[in-house]
Image: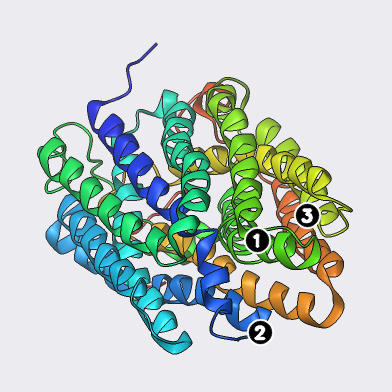
Amino acid sequence: MRQIPRGIWVLLAANVVIALGYGLIAPALPAFARTFNVSLTAASAVVSAFAVMRLVFAPTTGRLVTVFGERRIYLIGLLIVALSTFACAFAQGYWQLLIFRAAGGIGSTMFTVSAMALLIRMSPGDIRGRVSGFFSAGFLIGNITGPLIGSALLGFGLRMPFVVYAIALVIAAIVVATQLRDHGDRPEPGTQSSEGVIRFRTALRDRTYRAVLASNFAQGWSSMGVRVAVVPLFITDALDESASMAGVALAAFAVGNVAAIVVAGRLSDTFGRRPIMLPGLAIATAGTAALGFAPNLVVALLLCAAAGAGSGLFAPTHQAALADVLGNRQQGGSALAAYGMSSDLGAVSGPVVVGFVADSAGFGPAFVLTGVVTAVAFVLWSLAAETAPAVVGSRAHVTDPEPDPDPDATG
């Protein structure tokens, strides 16, 4: 079997460090916001503010990557998030916390878009699923240990996890700067396609691409938004458990994620993307919709693990499908940018909408709504075409007769 390129392993190692830090503050962030005497919706908005800036800054990031290269933008993004997170630790009011956390979204979209561009360009077609699985697993390994460590750090105060997260991001920047010197600032020989970038409007005509956008939106809504912002509040407010137990719930989701991810990518390379996507979306829908009705902590932890397993099946698989559709294209492109923006849009709207529903109607309807979002993605994937090279016989991608004259055009 073809070996995974060294650059992918470097990105995986950096992802572990990044996710470790992200997980550190996950149980602390909503609780920290609530110390300023704000509503559940306002506390959830702190998580959304980060994603709002990611969404707004995504088009600019595409242009920066084209001009300066993925590696440089990746490093700058990590350092921006490190500085903003360190500032959060010293916020003296709700609005300061909101602004500092939102500023981190700029750096986050820089390193996320850069990493995804590198992943797609450096991944051989016949192991795209396996590469996506390892890439996602690297992030989730940090997410497993991060909330547990973050919960332990809460004993030193709600501000301490932010300081530790900032340090973790500096470490990740050092890893990338020293170990990824030969990747990202210029195309690797033999890996850069002569094809132009795909226009968003052209890609949108492909039903698999539309399904990828839908599942990535659902991933942002449920896993990146509601899981981080609303699940901890459900554990502390509805089940009357401690903030430390909220961290355990986040870790349970991450455990389910990793258990599924380690096999999902390889299976999707062998059997196709759809046979893995559909069960994953179905499991995530059921586990998430039922969570708001959990009568106790044990049931809540089991449902978190089930939802995490469903997400773990489809997260790396739709990344591989995106690579099938786009192929080894030139840097940039509005179709790739739209993929990242779909997740951010879900992460922006999910916590605010679900937080509002939880405030007005309770946690049960709030989590049912999240299940509906995932169910819509399931419907679109049931109509999608298969793209895995092992199944279709050749690399599948959208036909674009005319390359974009402007790689950063929004379509």
**The C terminus sits in image quarter:** bottom left
Q: Quadrant of residue 56?
A: bottom left
Alpha-carbon span between mark 1 and mark 3: 23 Å
Kindly state the secondary structure of the residue where label 2 is placed: loop
At label 1, counting other C-alpha atoms closer than 10 Å, the crowd grade (few under 14, some 14-19, many 20 or more) is many
- Can residue 391 be seen here? The reply is yes
Q: Is residue 167 left or right of residue 129?
A: left
Judge by depth and name the residue closer to the eye, 278 or 172.
172
Question: Which residue has dot 3 on it?
Answer: 375
Q: Earlier in the sequence, mark 3 or mark 2?
A: 2
Q: Is residue 39 left or right of residue 23?
A: right
Residue at position x 80%, y 60% in the image: 239
Q: Residue furthest front?
A: 155
Amino acid on which the number 3 mark rests in the picture: Ala
Alpha-carbon span between mark 1 and mark 2: 14 Å
Question: Which residue has dot 1 on it?
Answer: 232
- Can residue 282 be seen here? The reply is no
* Residue 71: x %, y % from top left: 18, 50
Amino acid on which the number 2 mark rests in the picture: Ser
Judge by depth and name the residue closer to the eye, 342 or 105.
105
At label 2, counting other C-alpha atoms closer than 10 Å, the crowd grade (few under 14, some 14-19, many 20 or more) is some
Between marks 3 and 2 in the image, the one whose residue lies nearer the viewer: 2
Kindly state the secondary structure of the residue where label 1 is placed: helix
Between marks 1 and 3 in the image, the one whose residue lies nearer the viewer: 1
Q: Earlier in the sequence, mark 1 or mark 3?
A: 1
Q: Which mark is residue 283?
A: none
Q: Are marks 3 and 2 in contact (CB under 8 Å)?
A: no
Kindly state the secondary structure of the residue where label 3 is placed: helix
Q: Quadrant of residue 41?
A: bottom right
Question: Which residue has dot 2 on it?
Answer: 39
